[in-house]
Amino acid sequence: MRTATGTASAVAPGQSPTASVASGMAAKIIEKFNTWAFKRAQPGRPALLHRLVTRQVSAGRSINFILYWGKGPRNDPEAPDLQCLDFLASFATRIATAHAPGARITLCLTDTHARLNGHSPERIERYFSAIEQLARQRGMAAVRLSGVVANYAPTSPPPAPDDPALLDTLERSAGRWYRGLETAREGARQYLAMNMVEKVAVERFAPDSIFVTFNGSELSALFPDNLPIFFMYSLKRGTAVKPWFLDADGHPYEASR
């Protein structure tokens, strides 16, 4: 998302900042968004975060963010979706006060996960098309994860980590949301294998981006290996529930397997 809000830059128009100036500017930009108003935990790979923002500052480019947006039981956006999108827009606006090119946020709509969980193609398209329109109204971009994978997936799927605790966590989630033909455990295994491919594809698609997640660090194995990670609240400070898992009144859905 780009905005035209003024900046604190000390670089004359048309000139590139020196390395030390760019580094200092990057630190100020990071301070703008790396606050407890937005973050639920300290960023992953902070040194990489600083290097990436410094590189974007030196090139006069926007600070880029990419995040997964999933699908829950609802087929139409409701108040929680709008609140989350507005929260993301305020996040971008805050960055623009320190960096003229602003921030660009890309929603990666996880149609692959929705299909695995048993949602019909019609319902997936209905929900994600509406979310995409709402995102673009707020200056954000949106892509389908299936398209990213089709164009950027590795030739050989990376192996899934041998981590029983991680698989147990994913199985608990699958027990709530997976509606496929297999057991919740098998659904979790398939989800984990998919994520190994998808995280590589996302990293290749958006190499100059910060990966935003509403999840906690216990799922770090699912995130791109070479991007900075920003652990963010979803709707407001103190709330990390994903909006697509909230009903129209903002209450979490109950499992109904």
Image (tube, rainbow, N blue to C red):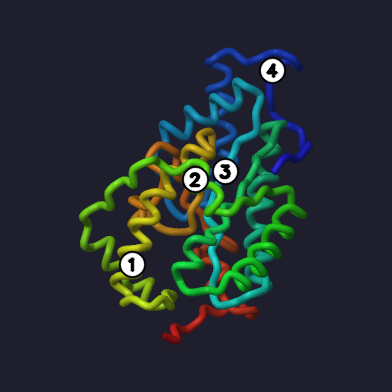
Q: Earlier in the sequence, mark 2 or mark 3?
A: 3
Q: What residue lies at 49% left-to-right and 48% top-to-bottom?
A: 149
**Which of the numbered marks, if any, corresponds to residue 11?**
4
Q: Which mark is residue 65?
A: 3
Q: Amino acid at mark 2?
A: Phe
**Mark 3–mark 4 distance (CA, rounded to whole Å):** 24 Å
Label 2 sits on residue: 211
Give the residue type that dot 3 points to: Phe
Rounded to the nearest angstrom, the CA distance separating label 1 from label 3 is 27 Å
User: Which quadrant would the C terminus be assigned to in this image?
Assistant: bottom left
- Give the distance between the C-alpha atoms of the residues marked 2 and 4, in whole angstroms: 28 Å
Query: Picture coordinates of residue 180 (x, y %)?
Result: 41, 76
- Tell me the crowding category of disc 3: few under 14, some 14 to 19, or many 20 or more residues within 10 angstroms, Cα based: many
Q: Secondary structure at mark 1?
A: helix
Q: Is residue 37 above or below residue 92?
A: below
Residue labelled with disc 1: 188
Q: Of label 2 and label 4, which has the lower sequence position?
A: 4
Q: Residues within 10 Å of mark 1 (few under 14, many from 20)?
A: many
Tell us which disc is closer to us: 1 or 4: 1
